[in-house]
Amino acid sequence: MTPPPAAAARLDSAPLPLPEKKPAARSAPARVDRPFRGIALILVSTVFLGASDVTAKYLSATLPSIEIAWIRFLMFAVIMVPAMLPGSPLYALRTPRPGLQLMRGLALLSSSLFFISGLRFLPIAEASATGFVAPLFVTALSILFLGESVGVRRWLATVAGLIGVLIIVRPGSSAFHPAAFFPLVSALAWACTLIMTRMMSGREHATTIMTYSSIAGVCIISALVPFVWVAPSWHDIALGIFIGVASTAGQWIVVLAFRYADASVLAPFSYTQLVWVGILGFIFFGEVPGIWTVTGAGFIVGSGLYTAHRERIRRSQLLALPGEPSPNA
């Protein structure tokens, strides 16, 4: 999260009396440049997120996708309860953008729900590799919603990533499964989540963003789950709780990682999640990634790494002093 402007006024230093002074929203913590700590955190997060995905695939054999997502978001909301209580020191519901917060929660829920739906039918390595095209969707959406300019090289990287998706999905072949679109829609929804996160970056605390996402997600999915309800066993409930805890912990560790390092530094290490899901998929489901999945994943990872590289160059150019050429120009 980008820290808020340093020139922002502190309400607690204002002279008394103040007419009905409202409590200030929690500010985002200052960022510290410790790349090795950020890399270590992002590596730990991939273990939690990979384990959550593998468990969701295992559970999809007995429970509907909507019910799995409901358990996941219910645990997410339970974990965030301290941030919902007005008297709590962690209270984080003050926000100037409640509508955008709730829309982000809807996008996050959609991403989770479509991905879990795909896991029911697809090998986990294939679904996970396809889901990693989200940064490429961010490239396109940043033009529409953030007003960013995207150069030819970043567009070529995006095209290369989409070619990787086509290699994995192979539409028109006998290996094609319609459920292959689920991870793609999930990636698009996750890209929307990231775009809205950028729009709030530096203005909202990470706790506030996560709390509203948990509230929006659990409320929406609770309205849908009665239509597909299957009575879970205690074993299913335990696995569902693990999914909720692991995914929430993974997301939170990612937020912490970005306090210590830039996205361009962390991006290469986030792809280790593909290694974890490949190993766990082989152990629990006997799935061995085929040559098409590995080749397509190579295209997607390569395009993602190049996109992160171009983002680092763009950032260095923006931070360069007027009249001082950027070393990466």
Image: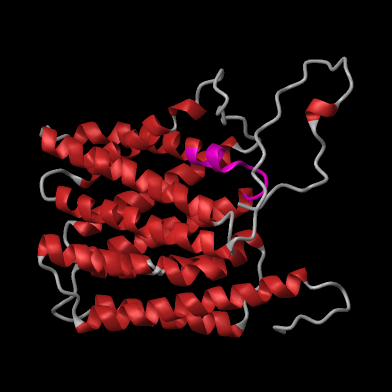
- What is the tally of numbered marks visible in this picture? 0
Q: Which residues are magenta?
A: 201-210
Q: Is residue 208 magenta?
A: yes
| Point 55% across, 56% down: residue | 258
* Residue 313 place in picture, x, y as percent: 65, 77
**Quick check: 257 left or right of 328?**
left
| Point 39% across, 69% down: residue | 271
**Quick check: 116 left or right of 259?**
left
Give the quarter of the image for residue 160: bottom left
Give the quarter of the image for residue 263: bottom right
Q: Nearer the viewer, residue 248 or 20?
A: 248
| Point 36% across, 68% down: residue | 272
Q: Is residue 44 visible?
A: yes
**Quick check: 148 left or right of 243?**
right
* Residue 329 place in picture, x, y as percent: 72, 84
Q: Is residue 83 magenta?
A: no
